[in-house]
C-alpha cells in the first residue's frame, strides 16, 4: 500500500470540478484508492460524490492511499494533481 499526506491548496476547496478531475484520474488505475481526512472521514477517490461529501476546504490535510497493482503510479499521479490544485492555480 502506498500513502501520502497532502494539503488542499484550492481556494474554493475540493468542489465539483476538482473532485471530477480527481475521480477521473483515479479511475484510470486498477488500484483501490481512498482519500481520508486526517482525523475525519474517508471516500473512494473514484467517486465524485464521495469526495464532495468529505467537504474538503482549503488547508485541509488528507491521506491519499492506494492498494493494488499500480498503487505507486496512482499515488504519484494523484499527488501531482493535488499539488497543482487540479489545474485551478
Image (cartoon, rainbow, N blue to C red):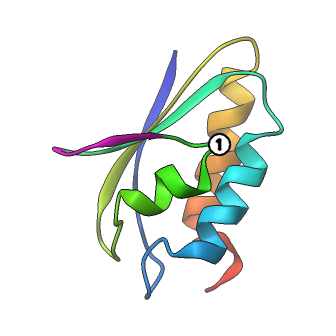
Q: Position of residue 57 (x, y in %)?
A: 33, 74
Q: Position of residue 40 (x, y in %)?
A: 20, 45
Instruction: Identify whether 45 is placed above or below 56.
Output: above
Q: How many marks?
A: 1
Which quadrant of the structure image shows residue 83? Answer: bottom right
Question: Residue 40 magenta-drawn?
Answer: yes
42 and 10: which is toward the camera: 42
Query: Which residue does the image show at 52% across and 15% down from the upper left?
Result: 1
Q: Relative to 8, is 74 on the left or the right?
A: right
Which quadrant of the structure image shows residue 19? Answer: bottom right
Element marked by disc 1? loop
Query: Which residue does the image show at 30% across and 72% down from the upper left?
Result: 59
Q: Position of residue 42 (x, y in %)?
A: 36, 39
Q: Which stretch appears magenta?
A: 39-43
Q: Quadrant of the C terminus?
A: bottom right
The residue furthest right is 28
Instruction: Identify whether 56 is placed above or below 77.
Output: below
Query: Which residue does the image show at 44% across and 86% down from the upper left?
Result: 12
Q: Relative to 44, is 31 on the left or the right?
A: right
Query: Which residue does the image show at 39% across and 59% down from the upper left?
Result: 53
The residue carrying pointer 1 sits among few (fewer than 14), some (14 to 19) or many (20 or more) residues within 10 Å by Cα, namely many
Q: Report the residue marked by disc 1.
A: 46
Amino acid at each position: 500500500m502506498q500513502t501520502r499526506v497532502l494539503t488542499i491548496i484550492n481556494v474554493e476547496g475540493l468542489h465539483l470540478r476538482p473532485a471530477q478531475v480527481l475521480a477521473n484520474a483515479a479511475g484510470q488505475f486498477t488500484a483501490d484508492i481512498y482519500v481520508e481526512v486526517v482525523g475525519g472521514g474517508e471516500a473512494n477517490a473514484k467517486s465524485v460524490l464521495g469526495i464532495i461529501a468529505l467537504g474538503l476546504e482549503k488547508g485541509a490535510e488528507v491521506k491519499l492511499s492506494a492498494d493494488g497493482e499500480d498503487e505507486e503510479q496512482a499515488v504519484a499521479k494523484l499527488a501531482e494533481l493535488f499539488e497543482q490544485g487540479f489545474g485551478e492555480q
